[in-house]
Image (cartoon, rainbow, N blue to C red):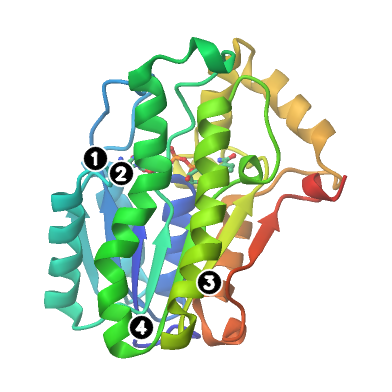
Amino acid sequence: MGLHDRTVVITGAARGIGRACAVRAAEEGADVVLIDICGDLPAVPYPLASAEQLENTARLCRKNGASVLVETADVSSRSAVRSAVTAAVDRFGRIDVLINNAGIGAPSGRPAHEFTEEEWRVLLDVNLSGPWRMIAAVAPVMIAQRSGSIVNVASTAGLVGYRHFAGYVASKHGLVGLTRAAALDYAPMNVRVNALCPGPVRDDPAVDGQMAAVVAESLGISTEEQEAVDLASVAMSSLVDPADLAGAAIWLAGDDSRKVTGTVVAVDAGFSAH
Ligand SMILES: NC(=O)c1ccc[n+]([C@@H]2O[C@H](COP(=O)([O-])OP(=O)(O)OC[C@H]3O[C@@H](n4cnc5c(N)ncnc54)[C@H](O)[C@@H]3O)[C@@H](O)[C@H]2O)c1
């Protein structure tokens, strides 16, 4: 129960890695604020999560004894982010942990010069400016408490390039940079900021995972072919599970990592060791 009595805010909590983090935080004794867009964005060529999926995450967290606040908000909107964070503080009185997980993997699948302005903008707006907006709303609360932990879910695409993923790669490299700069800004106030870099994650039905399928679709190959490419790219003999990310996120969130800030933790089955 490493997060007993802590309030953990998670964006993109309706499914995938966000759901895995939320349920694990609840298991660790935290109260959780679950934020998701619960709707689609016109420039994103696959469905984002639904209100029903967000409610499923909430149900799983409540089953573990957590008090849960569910907020529908698009991290591209400053006003929506602010009102979700205000609701969290009104309900729980504090925010101990922010897991900046909401992100999009496409539009992708073409060389950099073929992205439209709108496609480029949406990738940066959700994946990089979204976490910044959340930090802008949450940091004053953590600074006043003189404690807090922010976990930015970046990607191995924040460490190396991937062919035909320029917008995504640029956004995740930016998020790693934001992590390092914000860690320096808030270290004197005992607020830590770290990045988590997932490698290729298996689409786990338990969390409605679908990112491998989205990546495969944008590259015009089957999910099985994508998984084979992913498996060949990692040093270990299996892909990463959402639960592996949740474990690392909870470690970064809690006191066991109390002197860890400004770091990048790759959970990538050895991908980046090459
Ligand atoms: N799955 C992977 O292989 C992988 C690898 C590296 C990094 N990541 C990163 O992990 C994070 C989670 O990915 P996932 O695989 O669970 O994907 P996912 O699509 O299953 O989950 C992302 C969640 O974020 C939400 N979301 C998207 N845009 C939003 C917005 N503007 N405002 C609020 N919520 C929004 C979606 O509705 C969804 O619930 C992302 O940041 C992704 O880039 C994933």
Q: Residue 199: in sight, yes or no?
A: yes
Dot 1 and dot 2 residues touching (CB under 8 Å): yes
Name the mark on residue 250. Answer: 3
Camera-side residue: 4 or 52? 4
* Left or right, residue 202 beside residue 232: left
* Left or right, residue 274 beside residue 182: right
Dot 2 and dot 4 residues touching (CB under 8 Å): no
Q: Which residue is mark 1?
A: 38
* Left or right, residue 220 beside residue 18: right
Ligand 1 within 8 Å of the CB at mark 2: yes
Q: Position of residue 247 (x, y in %)?
A: 59, 67
Q: Which residue is mark 4?
A: 6
Is label 4 in a helix, a strand or a loop?
loop
Chain-order first, disc 3 or disc 4: 4
Ligand 1 within 8 Å of the CB at mark 1: yes
Q: Position of residue 206 (x, y in %)?
A: 49, 46
